[in-house]
Image: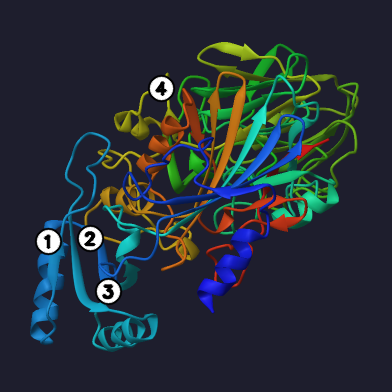
Amino acid sequence: MKKLAYYILFTLYACSNVSNDSKIPDLAIGRKGLNQQVSYKKLAEGLFFYQIQRGSPSPKDYFVLSSGAISEKTEKDLLKKLKEKGTISWIEEPAEKGPHGEFLGNIVRVGKFENIKDVQKKEQELKSEGIQMTVRHTAEDNKPTSGPFLLSILKIDLTSFKGNISSALGKNVIKEKAYVTDISKKNNALAAINGGFFAWNNTVGVDGEPAGISVINGELVSEATNGRSALVIDNNTPKKVSIAKNVTTRLRLFINDTSFLIHGINREAGKVLNCGNQIDSVRSRIPIHDFVCNNPNEIILFNKQFGKKSIQGEGIEFIINEEGKVISKNTYRGGEIPEKGYLIQATGSYIEELDSLIAKNQTIRVETKVFTDQKEIKLKNGIYLINGGPILLDNGKIDPHARFKEGFETQFQNFKVSDDFVDKKDKSSISDDAQNNRKGFYHGWVVRRHPRTAIGIKNNDVYIVVVYGRQPTITAGASITEMSTLFKQLGCTTAFNLDGGGSSMMVIKNRKTGKSSDISGEREVGDAILITE
């Protein structure tokens, strides 16, 4: 039945050709030389869709119980417990090293199982004995395999495509997520793809808020994760798509002769998913993916993109109309956001200072600017920015060492970092005993195969790729390095990773091209990239 369902899914989008199509080179996921069956369709002038079945299930792959890449101490303790219970185990090395060339730690494994039910039974047996291990499939290890792999590729020729490339929030406000299929249908899109990272629940932020920069049609909706890259779309003539490196936002509040740093836009004060936040006018934290940084002293700006009401809590807030005049001030937070103008909140040490300076009818100026490597990106109609990372290709080269700068550092000396906030749906990390050590997270998120969504640029051609994954014997997914290699095989010089995991989804004319890895089905996302006529 699985093979039949897969065949129906694969042939759904076929039109004039199903073959080893020369227009799509060997994508090299799994290993080079695997068979690729390609179907393609022209959606509009300059817009093409490719559906690719690559490889086939391998008899050498199997289900296994596994630890993550763990420290030597954790490894010894786990091996000892397994031995005491009479359970045979072995260790393996990760498929890649860390961003600095460091060893990430060994992986402890138990059993070789043909089906999911048997390995889940063993998992529960060990759990009842106080041993926590995770079900894995070896096709997802990022070692040579025949897969299989299911990929969807959208190719846009910017010189001939007359439509628009844009992004949209789930339900046009930050506080409400939506399925990519629904965002596509609502906007009558030819194609839609999941967009940037976002807060997946209220523990890590406001559920649905972009976890990094977001600009929608020239309006800044969310501040940058300073130091990370971003996808830039410019629909003005000539149409351009590019990757901006080292993106920062400069946000200021001018009251009389005093200027204040605005720490964030449209988010909960004090809570910054993926970090990279501006602490003061001089210092900012480095990006740390899937980790929440805190700052009790912040000024946060809200606009209509957030929703009708701001976030409740202790502090003060005041409303500025479109002329920049203060029209109200409250000694609490949680008021209504104006349709035009801003609502501004202050917490911690800023409460007393701003309260003493602000009066009704006072004129206040807000400045919001976006920079990349110190060059300003002028925001205007037709401009969109979408967060993500890391960069996959830069000037045609793959540079694993650069990943640590974009949120994937493995060792922290003077800053306590854990995996407490990692999205459990994605099962990309197993906790370790080592303090300030994110080697296990790097292995789980970067090195292992997962569903991925990414974009690459080759001259005036743009390739948007979704590799579906975490579906054993149907599609294994891809590692970050494999995604980099894929775009290199396509001839791209620049490529950039977007959100992945259960979020990865491409929709063509309101039809999904694959299945989400979430057991519950398609995942709601914070925003989506839209291709419209």
The answer to which of marks 3 and 2 sits earlier in the sequence is: 3
- Position of residue 336 measured from the top left corner of the image (x, y, whole percent): 85, 47
The answer to which of marks 1 and 2 sits earlier in the sequence is: 1
The answer to which of marks 4 and 3 sits earlier in the sequence is: 3
Q: Which residue is mark 1?
A: 73
Give the CA distance from mark 1 to mark 2: 8 Å
- Position of residue 70 measured from the top left corner of the image (x, y, whole percent): 21, 58
Question: Quick one: SS at disc 1?
Answer: helix
Say which residue appears at 56% left-offset and 18% top-offset.
459
Q: Residue 64, relative to residue 308: is it above or below?
A: below
Residue type for callout 1: Lys
Question: Quick one: SS at disc 4?
Answer: loop
Q: Quadrant of residue 325?
A: top right
Give the CA distance from mark 1 to mark 3: 19 Å
Q: Nearer the viewer, mark 4 or mark 1?
A: 4
Residue type for callout 4: Gly
Q: Do callouts 1 and 3 mark residues in contact (Cβ within 8 Å)?
A: no
Q: Residues within 10 Å of mark 1 (few under 14, many from 20)?
A: few
